[in-house]
Each structure stands twice: as structure tokens, then as C-alpha cells.
Amino acid sequence: MSGVMITNTAAAAHRAKVANAIKACGAIVSVAPFEFVRILARMEAPLIVGATGGLFSTHYKYLTTYRGLTFYCKSPTPLDVPSGAEIIDANKMVIPDL
């Protein structure tokens, strides 16, 4: 098999993987941390999924839904969430980078 054929096959496999990730996750809206906190402030009792990660430095990932949309943010520092928020600590959070 030639190198071009292997590359095309790998690219097609990657495209299929991305398409499946989109189907599984639905639409996820990535926002800045300050905007994520603003969205949480609009909610009566926010439910937040959070996870930490990082190899060389720690980062914090957050996910919530609001009005039928799923919002996600990644922050270098923990967010100051509303006092009535329910937080679910996830071991890992994987968001497709499209």
C-alpha cells in the first residue's frame, strides 16, 4: 500500500470518528469562563458537571445545560459558581475538539 493510500484511509477514519462523536454528543457550545458563570447566574438551581485535567498544568472543565443547549468551558482556575449549584465531579471529561 502506498503512503498516500494509508494517509487517505487514516483521514477517512478520523472523519468518521469525528462524525460519530458529534452524533453522540449533540451540539456543545464552547464559551469563555466568564460567560459560563453568567449563564449559571440565570439558572435557579444549576447542575454542573466538572472535571480537572492537564499534563503540565491543571485546568478545570465545566458542562451544563440551559434552555436546551449544552454549554462547556475550560478554565485555568476553578470557577466561582453560585451557592445553590449542584456539582457532579467527573473523573474525566472528553469534549470533541472540532
Image (cartoon, helix red, strand yellow):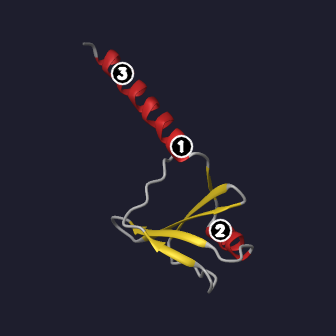
User: Front-most of 25 and 38?
Assistant: 25
Q: Indicate whether 68 appears above or below 24.
A: below
User: Of the residues under marks 2 and 1, which one precedes in the sequence?
Assistant: 2
Instruction: List x then y, in percent, for residue 62.
Output: 53, 67
The residue under label 3 is 9
Tag 2–tag 1 contact (CB < 8 Å)? no
Query: Is residue 60 left or right of 73 when viewed as pictured?
Result: left
Query: Is residue 18 left or right of 73 when viewed as pictured?
Result: left
Q: On residue 98, which mark appears?
A: 1
Q: Residue at x 40, y 71 (%)?
A: 58
Instruction: List x then y, in percent, for residue 89.
Output: 43, 72
User: Front-most of 72 and 7?
Assistant: 72
Residue placed furthest toward the top = 1
Q: Indicate whether 41 appears above or below 65.
A: below
Estimate the spatial distance between the alpha carbons at disc 2 and disc 1, rounded to whole Å. Answer: 20 Å
Estimate the spatial distance between the alpha carbons at disc 2 and disc 3, rounded to whole Å. Answer: 38 Å
The total of numbered circles placed on residues is 3
Q: Amino acid at mark 2?
A: Phe
Q: Which quarter shows the N terminus?
A: top left
Q: Secondary structure at mark 1?
A: loop
Q: Amino acid at mark 1?
A: Leu
Residue placed furthest toward the left = 1
Q: Amino acid at mark 3?
A: Thr
User: Front-most of 19 and 86?
Assistant: 86
